[in-house]
Amino acid sequence: MALSRRVLLGRLAAGAAGAALTAGTGGPAAARPAPGTRRRVRTGFDRLAADGYRLLDGHRVGVVTNPTGVTGDLRHLVDVMHADERVRLTAVFGPEHGFRGTAQAGGSEGRYDDPATGLPVYDTYNKTGEALAAVFTASGVDTVVFDIQDVGARFYTYIWTLYDCMVAAVLAGKRFVVLDRPNPVTGRAATGPVLDRAYASFIGREPISQAHGMTVAELALLFNGEFVPRATGRPVELETVPMTGWRRGDFFAATGLPWVPPSPNMPTPDTALVYAGTCLFEGTNLSEGRGTTRPFELLGADGIDRRWAAAATELGLPGVHFREAYFAPTFSKFQGTTIGGVQLHVHDPEAFDPVRTGIGLLVTAKRVWKGFAWRPDHGIDRLTGSSAVRTMTDAGAEPDEIVAAWQEGLRRFRTVRTRYLRYR
């Protein structure tokens, strides 16, 4: 029997502790610390709580968060703060997929009262500017706190929820606090094309690179220094609470933190590792693996065969193998149809470049499958940040030629980015 959203949310909240314990002890090995690894990283929330929430003293607080806003023992920060008399938590703000994470891509949970805490939950999804500022004003909060796990790619919408909320906080006269979490695919380097503002959307508001190599607190500092004043005339009143124990070269398994899927199709850190490249297939008529147990690692379409894996292998891309694969998505593109394609197997994460790999896969897919097509709305241009990838691929350019075309813009972004890095 179908459950209403309110009943489902209640059951999710009531079962959060049990589900969290299951998530912490099962699942892919990449989602858990390696055997013998001790938890090393303390998140921004860990440090805020350890300091007795002094940064929030005397303020009515609202939190922008989702299921990833957890402590090391998998308690949700909203539940922890609500139970602590030192914090005056009065509201929660849910992004895409919702505060408790019940919605699929392109959806949210709407306005409701959280069954676990009784707190009002406000929907931020698809709200910007004065409309979002009005939500903050209606909530009655003084300080907006942001704590969501990012995955390191420009088109993952939570970083633009961060940006939109910072802009709205300026308009509503609110203070803004960002609690930091690791970039799960390291913070070593920025790669990929930089957005052209002519192609700005919710999957890229401002000119940053496709894989930004920054944490959410570092991005907040960059946004506040480079972009928020352009939108509002002044920066937001911003505080960031950094992590301790995180190094720029750390992949997620090295942190000792539990992995909670930030969205329904981001089940493991392995997904995050490939996502900055293979999400480009959302801009094509191929499946990006939604509706499978390996989204963004499985790619394919009806009519593709072993030739694609062979062509991708011939590119000699570092750190990754391509396996001929067949699968039947349970939803999204090609639902219920057995299709052919490839599965990516990253064998050397240090050498792997997800964006260059994604370009190589686009080029070879177009060459070996006559059915290849871009989405009619040219969504690929919003994903890559300009029309260059699409037009160069159509013109028969080699992957390295396409990659070379964005290097000057990337060099300029890297120079700006360096000013806002906080971990060495």
Image: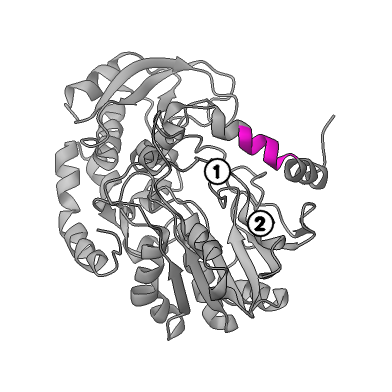
Residue at the disc numbered 1: 263
Determine the residue located farthest toward the right in the rendered image: 1
- The circle drawn on residue 80 is 2
> Disc count in the image?
2
Which is nearer the eye, 338 or 350?
350
Q: Is residue 51 visible?
A: yes
Q: Report the span colored magenta.
A: 15-21
Comparing labels 1 and 2, the label whose residue is closer to the camera:
2
**Residue at 54% in and 41% down:** 260
The kind of secondary structure element at disc 2 is helix
Amino acid found under the numbered disc labelled 1? Ser
What is the distance, in whole Å, between disc 1 and disc 2 at their CAs?
22 Å
Picture layout, residue 54 above or below residue 191: below
**Residue at 54% in and 69% down:** 165
* Residue 386 x, y percent position in the rendering: 31, 55
Marks 1 and 2 close (CB-CB < 8 Å): no
Check residue 16 for magenta coloring.
yes
Picture layout, residue 95 above or below residue 178: above
* Residue 120 x, y percent position in the rendering: 75, 64
Picture layout, residue 412 above or below residue 393: below
* Residue 378 x, y percent position in the rendering: 41, 48
Tell me which secondary structure the magenta stretch mostly adopts: helix
**Residue at 76% in and 62% down:** 119
Q: Quadrant of the C terminus?
A: bottom left
Amino acid found under the numbered disc labelled 2? Val
Q: Quadrant of the N terminus?
A: top right
- 289 left or right, relative to 63: left
Which is nearer the eye, 383 or 250?
250
Check residue 127 for magenta coloring.
no
